[in-house]
Image (spheres, rainbow, N blue to C red):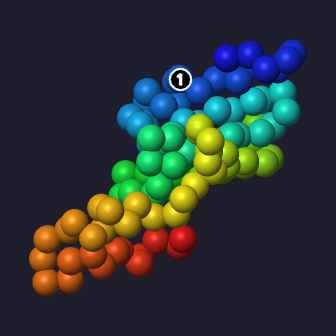
Amino acid sequence: KKFGNCRTSSSKYNRMNKMQSVRLEINKTRKVATIWLNRPHVLNAIDDRMADEVARAVGIADENDNVRVIVIRGSGKCFCSGYDLKIWAERKGSNAGQQDFTRPW
């Protein structure tokens, strides 16, 4: 993908890490990693997969010597509507609707 005079690479990171809910782009010229939340059909609401993939994308960017800044953006018309409450509410079990609070967000 090309933005102005700078090249970014996203497909290799996303293919290697099987990320579907987020897209990682690294611009080596600007030393910027952009993590795109990519669930626009639900206003980028966070589900288990997205939370794991955001953590993985941050880890990949953090380990890359060409990255000095990480930017998180949302695909579509919304940055992020928060956790996907529909998923939590529909879970089965004695604590239906309780989310996993072991994550830092």
Question: Where residue 49 sits: x, y (%)?
Answer: 37, 51
Question: Where residue 101 sits: x, y (%)?
Answer: 41, 78
Picture residue at 64% right of the left edge, 32% below the top = 25
The one nearer the camera, 63 or 88, is: 88
Q: As displayed, is residue 25 above or below residue 49?
A: above
Q: Residue furthest bottom?
A: 94
Quadrant where the C terminus is found in the figure: bottom right
Picture residue at 37% right of the left edge, 66% below the top = 85
Query: Can the viewer see residue 58?
Result: yes
Tell me the element at label 1: helix
Q: Residue 59 vs residue 85: left or right?
A: right
Q: Residue 70 vs residue 46: left or right?
A: right
Task: Determine crowd level at label 1: few under 14, some 14-19, many 20+ residues with C-alpha closer than 10 A.
Answer: some
Q: As displayed, is residue 100 above or below residue 46?
A: below
Q: How many marks?
A: 1
Picture residue at 70% right of the left edge, 40% below the top = 33
Q: Residue 50 vs residue 91: left or right?
A: right
Q: As displayed, is residue 54 above or below residue 14?
A: below
Query: Can the viewer see residue 59?
Result: no
The one nearer the camera, 73 or 15, is: 73
**Mark 1: amino acid:** Ser
* Quarter where residue 34 is shown: top right
Question: Where residue 36 sits: x, y (%)?
Answer: 60, 41
Q: Residue furthest left?
A: 93
Question: Where residue 102 sits: x, y (%)?
Answer: 41, 76
Picture residue at 63% right of the left edge, 50% below the top = 79
Which residue is identified by label 1? 11
Q: Residue 9 vs residue 41: left or right?
A: right
Quadrant where the N terminus is found in the figure: top right
